[in-house]
């Protein structure tokens, strides 16, 4: 294992695994799938060194269920998969949401649908991350764009999972998972490593209610075995026992929503690059944002005032900041590796009807900076004709 200050050359998938271990992950249940297999391989090698457990399950459904059970038993847990496996995990993600079980689901996206293109890049699972499972439910989904950020952001994913008692989706893509970059292993702030409650935290004769509202979230989780409590995917009261009344359903679902919605500002993060005087804004995320940043630099050399807005927290989407940027720019280009999943989100926020265009690719290839510059040039012509 590496320590803070070590300078390393590391693959994205490996950075994801080692960052998770640094965050306190001690259980990984998974099933091999390209392009996420290297995460499982790293976990199989490194987890036993820190007293953790790795289990290769029989499929992705079992993998997802195993990390929920491990988390309820007291171990911070994670699984990793790609598109087809992520589809299979959706019911378990819904169960983790309903039972407020902290765990992390990594999805290293590849071309789809179905088997698609296992070794090619895609960003096609953006909306699936939010609405893949049934029913109204909040979700937190993060998406890094560099190998170093993969290491640091997976630590935040575990923090958010524990703090809000919710499953967190950690999105990557084939290129990010397989690329190698050098970086210095950062020091981890201890405030991001949240310990679980133990039985010693209870007062004498105190009864633990695992689903009771606590500071606009949910009471911290105590491991099964330290305290007895009931877990059910059915509508339940604060004790965890099924209570299927209309009033209880209303209360529970609104509480699940509120604990994320009321903390949007605390959860959401984003990056801005040269947006102060931007006339045209590029919205891009994940690996696509790397090419977008290069396009901004090239455009600035030619005197074009272009800026970049990169959502890091994909869900909840950083609406408030983007709305303000939309008010100050003349046009927006959304660049993504799907048919316009975030474009639809930006369209919804474009109340002032600014010129808005989509640049997308779904052929398993990245959008090069030159293609973005061509799109920007066309948009400038359109602006002149307005």
Image: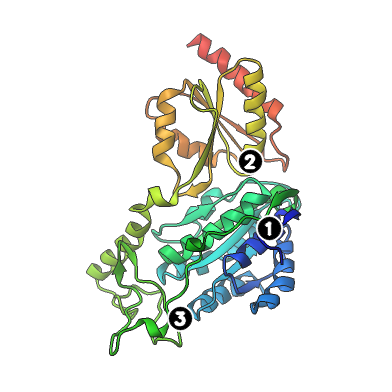
What's the residue at 74%, 48% (across, down)? 181
Residue 81, visible in the rendered structure: no
Mark 2 and mark 3: span between their CA atoms?
A: 41 Å
Farthest-out residue, front = 5
Residue 221's image quarter?
bottom left
Asked if marks 3 and 1 touch (Cβ < 8 Å), the reply is no
Sequence-wise, the earlier of marks 2 and 3 is 3
**Secondary structure under badge 3?**
loop
Secondary element under disc 2, as helix, strand or loop, is loop
**According to the image, label 1 marks what residue?**
15
Q: What residue did someone put label 3 on?
A: 223
Instruction: Tell me the residue at 22%/68% (across/down).
Output: 247
Q: Residue placed at 59% from the left, 17% from the top?
A: 304
Q: Where is residue 139 shown, x and y percent of the image?
A: 45, 57
Quadrant of the image occupied by residue 229:
bottom left
Q: Residue furthest top?
A: 385
**Circle 1 crowding by C-alpha within 10 Å: few under 14, some 14–19, many from 20:** many
Mark toward the start of the polypeptide (1 vs 2):
1
Total label count?
A: 3
Q: Are marks 1 and 2 in contact (CB under 8 Å)?
A: no
- Residue 383 in the image: x percent, y percent? 51, 14
Q: Nearer the viewer, mark 2 or mark 3?
A: 3
Compared to residue 282, the image places residue 119 above or below, namely: below
Q: Residue at x 65, y 79 (%)?
A: 51
Q: Is residue 81 left or right of residue 332?
A: right
The numbered dot on residue 337 is 2
Considering only order in the chain, which callout, 1 or 3, is on the residue closer to the N terminus? 1
> As displayed, is residue 51 above or below residue 161?
below
């Amino acid at each position: 294992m590496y320590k803070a200050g070590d300078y390393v050359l590391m693959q994205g998938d490996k950075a994801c695994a080692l960052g998770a271990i640094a965050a306190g992950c001690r259980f990984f249940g998974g099933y091999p799938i390209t392009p996420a297999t290297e995460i499982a391989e790293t976990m199989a090698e490194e987890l036993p060194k820190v007293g953790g457990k790795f289990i290769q399950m029989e499929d992705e459904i079992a993998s997802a269920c195993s990390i929920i059970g491990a988390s309820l038993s007291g171990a911070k847990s994670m699984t990793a998969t790609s598109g087809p496996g992520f589809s299979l995990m959706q019911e378990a993600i819904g169960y983790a949401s309903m039972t407020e079980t902290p765990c992390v689901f990594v999805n290293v996206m590849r071309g789809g649908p179905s088997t698609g293109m296992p070794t090619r890049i895609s960003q096609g699972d953006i909306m699936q991350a939010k609405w893949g499972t049934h029913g109204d439910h909040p979700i937190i989904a993060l998406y890094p764009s560099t190998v170093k950020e993969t290491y640091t952001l997976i630590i935040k994913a575990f923090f958010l999972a524990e703090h809000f008692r919710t499953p967190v989706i950690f999105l990557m893509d084939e290129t990010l998972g397989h690329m190698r970059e050098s970086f210095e292993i950062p020091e981890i702030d201890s405030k991001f490593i949240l310990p679980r409650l133990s039985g010693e935290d209870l007062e004498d004769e105190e009864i633990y209610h695992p689903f009771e509202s606590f500071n606009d979230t949910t009471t911290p989780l105590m491991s099964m075995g330290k305290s007895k409590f009931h877990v059910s995917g059915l509508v339940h009261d604060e004790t965890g026992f099924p209570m299927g009344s209309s009033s209880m359903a209303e209360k529970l679902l609104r509480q699940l929503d509120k604990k994320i919605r009321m903390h949007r500002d605390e959860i959401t993060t984003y990056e801005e690059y040269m947006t102060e005087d931007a006339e045209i804004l590029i919205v891009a995320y994940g690996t696509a944002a790397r090419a977008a940043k290069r396009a901004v630099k090239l455009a600035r050399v030619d005197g074009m005032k272009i800026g970049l807005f990169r959502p890091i927290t994909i869900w909840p989407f950083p609406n408030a900041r983007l709305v303000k940027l939309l008010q100050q720019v003349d046009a927006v280009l959304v660049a993504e590796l799907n048919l316009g999943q975030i474009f639809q989100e930006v369209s919804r926020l474009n109340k002032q009807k600014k010129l808005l265009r989509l640049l997308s690719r779904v052929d398993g290839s990245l959008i090069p900076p030159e293609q973005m510059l061509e799109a920007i040039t066309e948009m400038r012509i359109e602006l002149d004709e307005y």
